[in-house]
Image (tube, grey):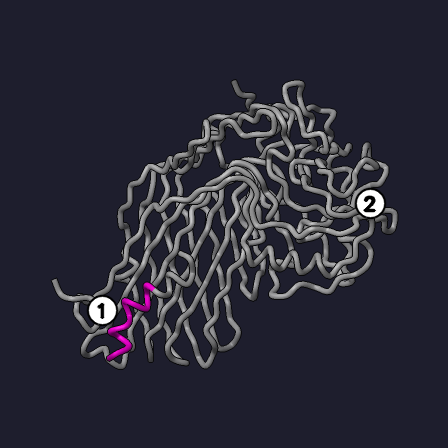
Amino acid sequence: MRGRRLLAAGLVVLLALTGCGAFGPEPGPAGAGDGEQPRYGQAPAPGKDVTLQPDVVLVGGGSRTVRSVSPDGLTWRLDPGARDADRLAPGRVMFLTGRGVGRVLDLAEDGGDLVVTIGPVTLTEVIRDGTFGGDGVILDRPTVYVAGEPSWTRETAAAGGTLGRSRPLAVASAQPPPAPGGQAGATAHGYRVQTFCCAGGVGTHFTYDDGGLRLAGTVTLTVGRPAASFHLAVGAGRVDRAELEIGGGFGIKVDFTAGIDGGQNHRRTFPVPVDIAFPIGLVAGLPLSFTVSQTLEVATAFGARRGTFRGAGEYALAGKLGFGYADGRVGSRVTEGFARRASLLDSLTGVPVGVMGLVVRHGVRFTMGISAFLFTAGIWFELITSYGATIGSALGAPYALCRGVGLGVRARFGIGYRILEPVVQVINKFLSLLSPSRAPRIPPIVASGGPSWSADVYRNQEVIPPVSICGQLPG
């Protein structure tokens, strides 16, 4: 009985613990030679109206120069004879393709390859002056890039070696080639995930089973026919203006099944190791892409060693998403229109022996910019939806089977890049285990670069039935 009184308060605690004059696109020149869907991105060809930072090195050859890329995106094996590859040095910025951009952390020679380890950069660390824009970019023909099994999908970093910052003793397989469409499978932190985009929305189906704890579900940011518009103006290495809008009518949707049979509660937070990319082409000579990436967090709070419960819900959310920045001022451009389509609260069912709680958090980030996976940098907008659900013990069901739902939607947006802190810790642990080749030392990468802001979009909690035993007074 006391457990049911605490159900509403437990839902609040569970949610708290989980933190609930522009140049448009143009096709690349035939001489670029990268083809329509180059494996590692299109080569840059900066126009006369774009000035790059002085420490940026344009390595020639585009995707043809790349021999392999490690799953974590840190290590690029290149043809050492590529144009200007000999100008690369620790501290400089490598700009090879639209997906191959980063601060050089270390260099090594191995087996006839030039092994380059890179870290993230912000837009203004690459671009000194330039204006870029596009309107009504239809997001309907994605290319999916799967990272493979990078170090940041595991709980601990692999041991290091001595051949520079990019050659651990346990060499992982290279990234698989990209494929058309928005569906791809991957694994991370014991979860199997399947991404999908774009008919009906962008989302991830997930499953987890360690023998004692079983979880399955699907989280979706629903959308009709998405289209994006963007504008970026950089002068003297500073962003003067940045705008990003994505339209199409958005909603949120979730379904889950959870069960425990002698297992332990857990919490996992990780980026889904899949990029869903929409190459825009050369904009003022720079190969920009519109990239959709996702993060997933799952936390259980089961008060007994045995039980099951499930639920599903869907809600309309907004007509468009985005933000604008100019003259030092920023504003969200989310046109809110929340409406319940299918109640998560009403759907909660199960056979819980004790109080059972679950939080699923789904982040979807839209970025117009450069680089890949964790290092994608540009103008970005992220929508983070937290679903919290609790159900009381079935042992007290004849009196009142308490059910509670918390729903929170928050927007984050910025100019630059942002990486989950737990992932940064894994990457830095991995880097610390490696011995540098040319660099005297390698500083750790940081979790974010460039300004960012956030705003609440929607937040609500409900508990039924409306009785004091469930933590809510009648009336």
The residue carrying pointer 2 sits among few (fewer than 14), some (14 to 19) or many (20 or more) residues within 10 Å by Cα, namely: many
Q: Is residue 89 above or below residue 460?
A: above
Point out the frontmost of discs 2 and 1: 1
Residue 7 within the segment the image draws in magenta:
yes
Note whether residue 39 is visible: no
Quick one: SS at disc 2? strand
Residue at the spot of label 1? 471
Circle 1 residues within 10 Å: few <14, some 14–19, many ≥20? many
Label disc, if present, on residue 114 of the rendered structure: 2
Q: Is residue 15 shown left or right of residue 30?
A: left
Q: Position of residue 423 (x, y in %)?
A: 58, 57
Residue 181: where, in percent of width, then height? Answer: 55, 43
Residue 381 visible in the picture: yes
On whether residue 293 falls in the magenta region, the answer is: no
Q: Tell me: residue 14, above or below residue 392.
A: above
Q: In which quarter of the image is the N terminus?
A: bottom left
Q: Please report the residue visible at 85 percent of the width from the left and 48 percent of the height from the top.
A: 109
Q: What residue type is labelled 1?
A: Gly
Q: Which of the two residues, 312 or 384, is positioned nearer the viewer here?
A: 384
Task: Please tell me which residue is depicted at 82% across the width and 55% down the height of the picture.
Answer: 163
Majority secondary structure of magenta residues = helix
Q: Distance between the residues labelled 2 and 1?
A: 63 Å
Residue 410 as seen in the image, left or right of residue 112: left
Quarter of the figure with the C terminus: bottom left
Choose the circle earlier in sequence order: 2 or 1. Answer: 2
User: Looking at this view, is 448 or 59 the one in front?
Assistant: 448
Label 1 SS = loop
Q: Position of residue 470 (x, y in %)?
A: 22, 70
For the record, the magenta segment spans 1-12
In the image, 237 versus 228, the foreground residue is: 237
